Image: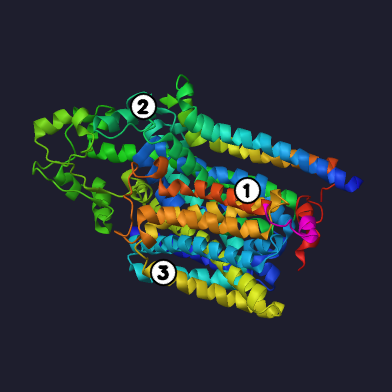
Amino acid sequence: MSDRQSSNAYWQANLRIIYICLAIWALVSYGFGIILRPLLSGISVGGTDLGFWFAQQGSILCFIALIFFYTWRMNRLDAEHGVDE
Amino acid sequence: MSQFTLNLLFITASFALYIGIAIYCRAKSTAEFYAANRGVGPVMNGMATAADWMSAASFISMAGLIAFTGYDNSTYLMGWTGGYVLLALLLAPYLRKFGKFTVPEFIGDRFYSPTARIIGVICLLIVSITYVIGQMTGVGVTFSRYLEVSNSTGLWIGAGLVFCYAVLGGMKGITYTQVAQYVVLIIAYTIPAIFISLQLTGNFLPQLGLFGTHDASGVAFLAQLDGLVTDLGFRQYTEHHNSTLDMVLFTMALMIGTAGLPHVIIRFFTVPKVSDARKSAGWALVFIALLYTVAPAVGSMARFNLTATMWPGAEQGDTFSMPAVSLADIETSPDLAWMRNWQVTGLLNWEDKNGDGLIQYYSEAGAANAPVAAVIEEQGLVGNELTTVNNDIMVLANPEIANLPGWVIAIVAAGGLAAALSTAAGLLLAISGAVSHDLIKGTLMPNISEKGELMAARISMAASILVATILGLNPPGFAAQTVALAFGLAASSIFPVLMMGIFSSRVGKEGAIAGMIAGMLSTILYIFAYKGIFFVAGTNFLPDTPDAWLFGISPASFGTIGALINFAVAFGVSAISKRPPAHVQELVESIRVPRGAGGAISH
């Protein structure tokens, strides 16, 4: 039973981290890159605005950071719950 | 040394490398053939995944797609990279923990249904076969342009090479050749980009050059490009023109389609541990980003160079300060030899419509309200005189447009081939695995021996190569449209069923089967309604225009809606059907924890 509870807590914690990461994932691409671009039009970046930078470069850099953050965070979580390999 | 000899030298050397690796890495068991014995390190697998993923379309076409549309086609950049976040967070680690060999096998086991597995095989085959046609035609085109052989000879040479390393080596051989192919293709893509960025902006890194300053005029490069294209009546490069909703849905379709592509997913079966699958997705994206952050720079700079070739005044920042390029120059000047070379391939063409000896390039659609209108009036122009500019020319002719040395051109040829061949090999492995493992071993002949299955895998690989080559030789008329179909189906059928299999223990076989069928059929129907049945022109029953699209959703974006339909139907049907049996509940529990992935190797 305690095993099951621990794995439940582990799964809930994993889901929380996934939600946070996906929120950032959507914000930098769909948000800053597309929908919120008009709001960022005041911030100029090399001949255009910040939204253009997010759409063509910034979002990709954020995606990389997100995956490595998730990997690092999950390795810690795996160890805390004793389910690492 | 002539350009032809250089091309031959670089291409032959790269092929010798791939074959050497193939002989060194022969597969001796099914575990080696399907999953490289789960012994590929995460960085190495990331590099192989990058080559597997980046196809002829990424290498040859993407920069051109961005170049001629500008900001609106950022969808490709975000869509084809954002999918890796979904893979790393939602699919790869759990499917690696599951520890089997193919995607349909997971669907069959998790939904305790051979029918679900067969539907999975059908989705996989449609997606992968449509995708492989594009790769094979890419091989043919590259060969015929750079080695002066016929399209079909080029295709057979490419097929022979893939046969050598894919049939012999399976996943193991493919993995290590893909690593080599990644190195070749990334060098081929970045070297011309660095040269061009230096020429135009003085920045060594194209990623910085894109947002840097145009040296000759001292103005920000993108502002300069915006000014140049709007002078000629084209739409402003950095502005948003199309529907926001469609842009969001198309990006989403590309992202979840990427995450649902079987040939990408199976790459994550080759790493030793669950944590390696997560890390490997990160490395894959690093290696992909090396090309994907250079592509928008290549696109915009090549567009600038091409336009400035046509209007030499633009190089100093004033489009109409000098007359347009003359017909005599195009036909005789050594600097413009590339225009004559590419005219032969049909990717570029021009016509002096008003007979004034100059070739004026502008947008007929937007000319009326642009500065070019005055030039049209004054010089009596009757139409745009650069009549054909193919998207693909932006990458293929890029080194020639910028007058780079011959060896750069040769390495671009080798890179284009590496991109097409590496993706073709990954697709062929996914196809042959589905045939030998899911159909033959899983359904038709469950008692086949390990040795028999390995032989079956090799034979189905050889047969897939033959089919792909024949389809590449006689591409069905719809080859160019198939990307929309492949991504739409991967997004609407494969991604949702995998995600529900992992994140829900409630969805059972009835829900999964109904969901997959609903997602797949709705997407196919929507695409065919606008594009024609099997893309046959004239059989569409609705006109393919933004006004006729349902809520302005383009057929290529419909995969996102198909995925939503899939989820909705699957949850709806599951709510009224039985819970999955206990052993499936246990399977779901077990794939959610990383410990024990090493033990899951055996079958």
Asked if A46 appears above or below B594 in the picture, the reply is above
Task: Name the amino acid, label 3.
Answer: Leu
Q: Can you tell which quarter of the image residue B222 is in?
A: top left
Is residue B319 rendered magenta in the image?
no
Q: Left or right: where does residue B16 sit relative to residue B3?
A: right
Asked where in the image residue B511 lies, by quadrant, the reply is bottom right
Residue at the (37%, 65%) spot, across then down? B476
Mark 1 neighbour class, 10 Å CA radius: few under 14, some 14 to 19, many 20 or more: many
Disc 2 target residue: B223
- Circle 2 chain: B
Q: Is residue B395 visible?
A: yes
Q: For the residue labelled by badge 1, is the local secondary structure a helix, a strand or a loop?
A: helix
Q: Which residue lies under the disc numbered 1?
A: B87
The residue pinned by badge 3 equals B471
| Quarter of the figure with the C terminus of chain B | bottom right
Question: What residue sits 33% from the left and 39% below the top?
Answer: B303
In the rendered image of this protein, does residue B510 appear above or below residue B281?
A: below
Residue at far front of view: B576
> Where is residue B487 drawn, in percent x and y?
49, 53
> Magenta segment, which residues?
B576-587
Q: What kind of residue is marked 1? A: Leu
Q: Which of the two residues, A28 or B231, is positioned nearer the viewer here?
A: A28
Residue A45 is situated, as x and y percent measured from the top left of the image, at 46, 24
